[in-house]
Image: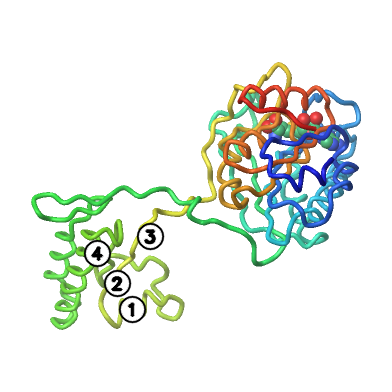
Amino acid sequence: MISQYLNNSSLVPFFLCGNSCELLKKLPCDCIDMAMTSPPYWGKRDYDCEDGIGLETDFKVYIDNLIGVFSEVYRVLKPSGSFWLNIGDSYLHKHLLGIPWRVSLRMCDEQKWILRNSIIWNKIKGAPDNSLDKLRNVHENLFHFVKSKKYFYDISMARKMPLKAKIHHGAVISASGVTGVRYKRQIELSTVLTQAQKNVAFIELENILNQVREGIIADFRMIIRGQQRSTHSDSTRVSGRAKELVAKGFYFLKYHPDGAKMGDVWDIIPEDTQGRKLHFAPYPSDLCRTPTLTTCPSGGIILDPFCGTGTTMAVAYENGRKSIGIDISKQYIDFAKERIAGNGLFQQG
Ligand SMILES: C[S@@+](CC[C@H](N)C(=O)[O-])C[C@H]1O[C@@H](n2cnc3c(N)ncnc32)[C@H](O)[C@@H]1O
């Protein structure tokens, strides 16, 4: 059944019910483009199964069990593949255990995963917390791992579209409101630039304003010696920019025309739309979207070994990717199938 699914062109998710460590063994090596999952927390959630991961009495055994599943994920992932792991932390006798990093470091040290990003998912609201001797916990980690140094990554999907520059009474105004007037004045009044440096600065400032006018770049900043601080380091030993500032008297920072790259802190409010009565920890679709679009090619295949209510699968389908979801709970698999059927999908698995 799995090999049939892998080879057909259907985008409809395929579900498997059972222990993911066992079921993953049925998948051939190097067949998955991207995996994304959020395993159960250790000792926190009351899942619909008695022998699921997260119920171990010792958190070190919990980590061993996760490491066992992730070694199978490593095996089934293509060399060009990515694995996105969303994992929450737990307390024991007042100690914050640091479970996300314990797991992540073992994956790198023992399984040769390459960690590319540690994203902070800022949940903004967080769970209620009545303790009087610590802060509320409102973030979780989302780690991006790859198998090899060269992997599939569509950076255009991780850019925020820039605002457009405007022309006002014939003068260009960059997306963030830069007109060049202030820079021209700073060059004119500079007591540290030579006249020759000023002449070059005026010409290059005019050139860059023309680039904004023609839409070649959306925005820029000018760093002028004695006016703005160098953006990296003031030390000419360390920073090429600082050297440029000394030699030429100025430099430009050009903003990428396709927009700025997303950062590694994501503000996403947890959704409450996926049947809280049935399941306690679905992650929001928005958490899956960027991983799906950046690291799974269109028509590629995504795996979630702890799929719960099937959020990963729903986002995969909406974005034209195939997917395989595994969960130990039949109730959650049924719910995931119903959820996806609600989106007008026929069910498999
Ligand atoms: C945090 S939830 C996943 C939530 C999911 N991301 C969603 O959006 O609904 C973790 C899931 O792991 C499942 N689980 C626990 N132990 C498992 C095991 N050994 N094999 C497969 N699934 C397991 C639980 O039933 C639970 O649904």
Q: Is residue 153 above or below residue 149?
A: above
Residue corresponding to mark 3: 256
| Label 2 CB-ligand 1 distance < 8 A | no
Mark 2 touches mark 4? (CB < 8 Å): no
Viewport quadrant of the N terminus:
top right
- Which disc number belongs to residue 251? 2
Q: Earlier in the sequence, mark 3 or mark 2?
A: 2
Please tell me in which quadrant of the rendered image residue 16 appears.
top right
Which element is circle 4 on?
helix
Residue at 73% over, 22% down: 335
What residue is rendered at 17% in x and 68% in y? 206
Tell me the residue that label 1 is attached to.
244
Question: In the rendering, at what x and y percent does residue 176 appear?
Answer: 27, 50
- Disc 1 CB within 8 Å of nearest ligand 1 atom: no
Determine whether, in the image, residue 243 is placed left or right of residue 23. left
* Separation of residues labelled 3 and 1 (CA atoms): 21 Å
Residue 51's label in the rendered image is: none
